[in-house]
Image (spheres, grey):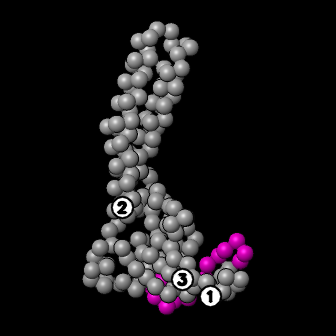
């Protein structure tokens, strides 16, 4: 049994569009090139054929992977939370959280992260997985709460300054 793949609506759409791009554009293009290269004769020294077959295997592998991720995807839409103020101060999947370090060298510095699915992680944009230690520590905490997290330099306490839902 595969573990559920929680994902935001935007992440689900991105995976679906990549899958459609591969199925409708990239794969047919490579199939056409391989067919053309195969018709040229000797395949053992035909670079277009050899590379095309390799690229086709890569595309098929990615299509299988994306299909599997979508099969187990559970789309979590926090639109209701945003519009109804339903627990808008509590941290759940999809929340954008601003917190401040209360201890250590970075004491007082503010950081903003968004808790997303494992397929959406982008540390440059502050997107962290819901299974990451920081997200696990923050989930179910509320605005103003102080939470202890384990960091490489040891335990640190952080305070939740803001909780938003996109």
The image position of residue 113, as x and y in percent, is: 50, 73
Q: Which mark is residue 86?
A: none
Magenta stretch: includes residue 120: no
Specify which label sits upstream in the sequence, 1 or 2: 2
Specify which label sits upstream in the sequence, 1 or 3: 3
The image position of residue 20, as x and y in percent, is: 33, 43
Residue 152 in sight in this render:
yes
Residue plotted at (34% across, 55% down): 13
The quadrant where residue 12 appears:
bottom left
The image position of residue 2, as x and y in percent, is: 44, 52
**Which is more toward the observer, 91 or 42?**
42
Task: Answer few, some or many: residues within 10 Å of disc 3's Cα (few below 14, many 20 plus, some between 14 and 19).
Answer: many
- SS class, disc 1: loop
Magenta stretch: includes residue 149: yes
Residue plotted at (37% across, 24% down): 32
Specify the farthest residue to the top: 41
Q: Identify whether 55 is placed above or below 141.
A: above
- SS class, disc 2: helix
Specify which label sits upstream in the sequence, 3 or 2: 2
Circle 2 sits on which residue? 10
The image position of residue 23, as x and y in percent, is: 34, 38
Circle 1 sits on which residue? 108
Q: Report the side of 117 relative to 75 (left or right).
A: right
Circle 3 sits on which residue? 99
Residue 71 in sight in this render:
no
Gap between marks 3 and 2, in whole Å? 24 Å
Query: Which portion, as a residue range, is magenta?
Result: 140-154
Residue plotted at (31% across, 78% down): 81
Task: Answer few, some or many: residues within 10 Å of disc 2's Cα (few below 14, many 20 plus, some between 14 and 19).
Answer: few
Gap between marks 1 and 3, in whole Å? 9 Å
- SS class, disc 3: strand
Q: Identify whether 165 is placed above or below 14.
A: below
């Amino acid at each position: 049994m595969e573990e559920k793949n929680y994902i935001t609506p935007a992440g689900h759409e991105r995976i679906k569009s990549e899958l459609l791009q591969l199925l409708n554009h990239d794969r047919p293009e490579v199939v056409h090139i391989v067919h053309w290269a195969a018709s040229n004769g000797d395949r053992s020294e035909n670079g277009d054929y050899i590379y095309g077959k390799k690229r086709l295997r890569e595309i098929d592998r990615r299509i299988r992977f994306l299909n599997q991720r979508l099969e187990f995807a559970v789309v979590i839409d926090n639109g209701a939370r945003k519009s109804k103020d339903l627990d808008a101060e509590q941290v759940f999947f999809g929340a954008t959280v601003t917190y401040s370090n209360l201890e250590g060298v970075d004491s007082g510095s503010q950081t903003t992260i968004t808790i997303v699915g494992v397929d959406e992680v982008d540390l440059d944009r502050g997107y962290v997985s819901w299974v990451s230690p920081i997200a696990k520590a923050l989930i179910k905490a509320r605005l103003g709460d102080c939470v202890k997290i384990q960091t490489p330099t040891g335990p640190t306490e952080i305070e939740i300054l803001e909780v938003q839902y996109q």
